[in-house]
Amino acid sequence: MAKDYYEILGVSKDAKPDDVKKAYRRLARKWHPDLNPGNREAEQRFKDASAAYECLSNPEKRKIYDEFGEDGLRAGFDPGKAREYRKWTQGHGPEAEPSFGRYRSYEDIFGNMFDFSKAGDYSARRSRKGSDIETGMTIDLISSLKGVSTRIAIEKPEVCGDCKGAGVRTAAGAALCPACRGTGKISVADGPMEFTRTCPQCRGTGRTIAVCAGCGGSGQQSKTEKIRVDIPAGVREGSRVRVAGKGESGPGIQTPGDLYLIIHIEPHPFLKREDDDLLMEAPVTLAEIMAGAKIVIPTIDGPVTLKIPPQSQNGQTLRLKGKGAVNPKTKKRGDFLVRLQVRVPKTKDEKTLQAVKEMDRLYGEDPRAGLEL
Ligand SMILES: [Zn+2]
Ligand SMILES: [Zn+2]
C-alpha cells in the first residue's frame, strides 16, 4: 500500500466522521490548486487528500479499506471471497500448497482470484523487464585505444519459447485434467462460502500437462545470440560497457534487460597504458641518441615523426602531446611517451669493436665515477 489514507489526513484510525471531514477541509483549504497556482506539490497533496476523504468518508469503503487496504478499493474486489480465501490460505498455509510456488505475494494471489479471464495465460504474469546480463570480453590494447565494433556470441537465458515460461506443456490430444475435469478451475470451500480458483494441477489448461522438454521445467532456455557491440575508444581494464536491450528477453518480457560487457585488455608487447598516457620503448642507435635524429614512431593515429635532440641519454623520455589514450569521461587525450633505448649492435666484427673502443676515449671521464655504496 503506497499511501495511508489516515496518515494523509492526519487523523487516527478511530477518528470520528466529523473529524475526518474537518481534517479534509483544513487540507483542502491549504492545498487547493486555485490557491496555489502552478504548485505541483500542492496539487498532489490536494489529490491525495481528496482520495483519502472519498474513501474514509464512506463508512462501507472505510471498512473495506481498514480490512484489505487499497487492494480492497479496486474494481471487482469481492470482500466475501477475499475473506474466505484468506481464511483458507491461513488454514492451509502457502507452503502446504506446492502449486503456490508461482505466486510470490499476497497481491499475486489476489490478482489471480479476481481475473479469471487470464487463467492459464502465464505470459501475462511474466510481462516484466528482463534481467541484465554481465559477461566478460577480452580485447587487445590497440582496439581498446581506438575503439572497436565487432560481433560477439553470447549465451543468454530466454523465456522458453516452447512453454512461454510456464515450465509445463500440454501435449496435443492430452487427456482432461482429472482434478478439474477439464474446466481449468477448482472450487475451494471452507465454511459458508465457496469460490473458484485456477486448477493447480493443470495450471488452468484443463488438460493433463507434462514438464516442458525444451526447458526441463525451468521456464528458461539458454540461447546463443550473435550481437554487434561497439566498444568506445579509451575503455580501461575492467570497464563496464552497456549494450542496451541485449539482456534477457523472450516471450512475455516486455522490456528486455541490458547486456554489460566487462572489458579485459590483453597486454601489448611494446605499448603500455598508464592512466591516459601511453608509454613506448623506442630502440635507437648510438649515433641517433648522441647526434640527434628524426625517427618515425607508430602511434594510434598513425606514424609520427619524433625529433631526438642531440646529446640525449639512454632511458630519456620524450613526449608527444595529445597522442595518448582517450579519457572515457572527459574525452580528453593523454600524451604518448617515448622512452629512448639504445640498441647496441651484436657483432664480433673487428672493425666495429675497434671503432667503439676508440669512442671510449671520448667519454672524458669515468662513467662510474661516484658510484659507491
Ligand atoms: Zn485441472
Ligand atoms: Zn519450456
Image (cartoon, helix red, strand yellow):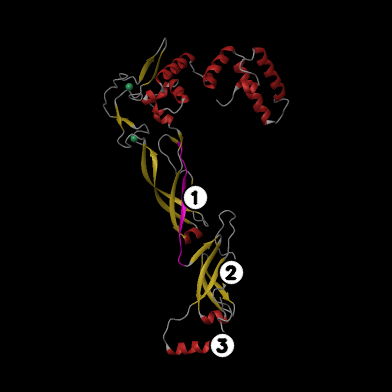
Per the rendered image, the range of residues in magenta is 254-269
Q: Which residue is mark 1?
A: 241
Quarter of the figure with the N terminus? top right
Tag on residue 362?
Answer: 3
**Image point (29%, 35%), residue name:** 213
Q: Identify which amino acid the numbered label 3 is placed on.
A: Leu
**Image point (63%, 24%), residue name:** 48
Taking depth in this image into account, of 362 and 183 the one nearest to the observer is 362
Q: Which residue is mark 2?
A: 319
**Image point (43%, 81%), residue name:** 346
| Count of numbered circles on the image | 3
The mark closer to the camera, 2 or 3, is 3
Taking depth in this image into account, of 112 and 303 the one nearest to the observer is 112
In this picture, residue 95 sits left or right of residue 329 = left
Tag on residue 42?
Answer: none
**Vertical side of 53 occupied by 323: above or below:** below
Tell me which numbered mark, 1 or 2, is placed earlier along the sequence. 1
